[in-house]
Amino acid sequence: MADIKSLDDLKSAVGAAAAPAAEAAAPRAPVRDKLGRAYATGKRKDAVARVWVKPGSGKVVVNGKEMAVYFARPVLQMILKQPFTIANVEGQFDVYATVAGGGLSGQAGAVKHGISKALQLYEPSLRPALKAAGFLTRDSRVVERKKYGKPKARRSFQFSKR
């Protein structure tokens, strides 16, 4: 290690050490299978979604059904469209997803998470927009488990002084 006697010496030593690390971090490469699709899993609450994304006309199929049939509520359909809106690629990708567990709201969140991860794998240039919107982060909030001696997770029996 070089003799560091001033702040300028420290800055130059740190700059020299950081330069090789910056060169080693190569830009991300697209990850696609032999059929030209990107695959990712998405999770939300108890729901787990397997999502495949490929270029197409914007068709979304969830568990063998059209998105409008499987997710009948407009709010859930809007949740699924958010990654495409943020990435500015509406109508350019077809999505095939299988989802299990949880309820419809959790499943919609899981598919959204999977779509976001698959989009950034297919086209790494979309990553900054999706990351800034928070779509690549798994929402870790799950239902708290029930504790023994209690009727629910935290609910206690009614207290009686006498």
Image (spheres, rainbow, N blue to C red):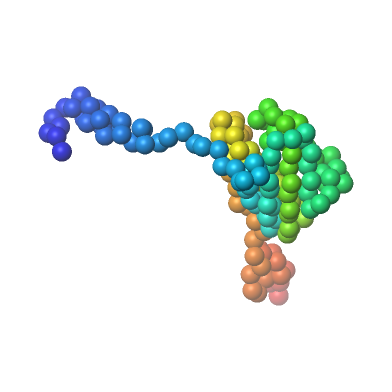
Pinpoint residue 10: horizontal percent, then vertical percent: 21, 30
Q: Nearer the viewer, residue 144 or 82?
A: 82
Residue 54 seen by the camera: yes
Pinpoint residue 3: horizontal percent, then vertical percent: 12, 33
Residue 135 seen by the camera: no
Q: Is residue 150 left or right of residue 9?
A: right
Residue farthest along the top direction in this orientation: 8
Residue farthest along the front direction in this orientation: 34
> Residue 13's image quarter?
top left
Pinpoint residue 5: horizontal percent, then vertical percent: 13, 30
> Residue 76's image quarter?
top right
Q: How many marks?
A: 0
Q: Is residue 141 left or right of residue 24?
A: right
Q: Residue at x 26, y 34 (%)?
A: 17
Q: Is residue 76 left or right of residue 162?
A: right
Q: Residue at x 15, y 32 (%)?
A: 4
Pinpoint residue 119: horizontal percent, then vertical percent: 63, 38
Q: Quadrant of the C terminus?
A: bottom right
Q: Residue at x 60, y 43 (%)?
A: 32
Q: Residue at x 78, y 42 (%)?
A: 60
In the depicted structure, whether residue 102 falls above or below residue 58: below
> Residue 154's image quarter?
bottom right
Q: Quadrant of the N terminus?
A: top left
In the depicted structure, whether residue 105 falls above or below residue 150: above
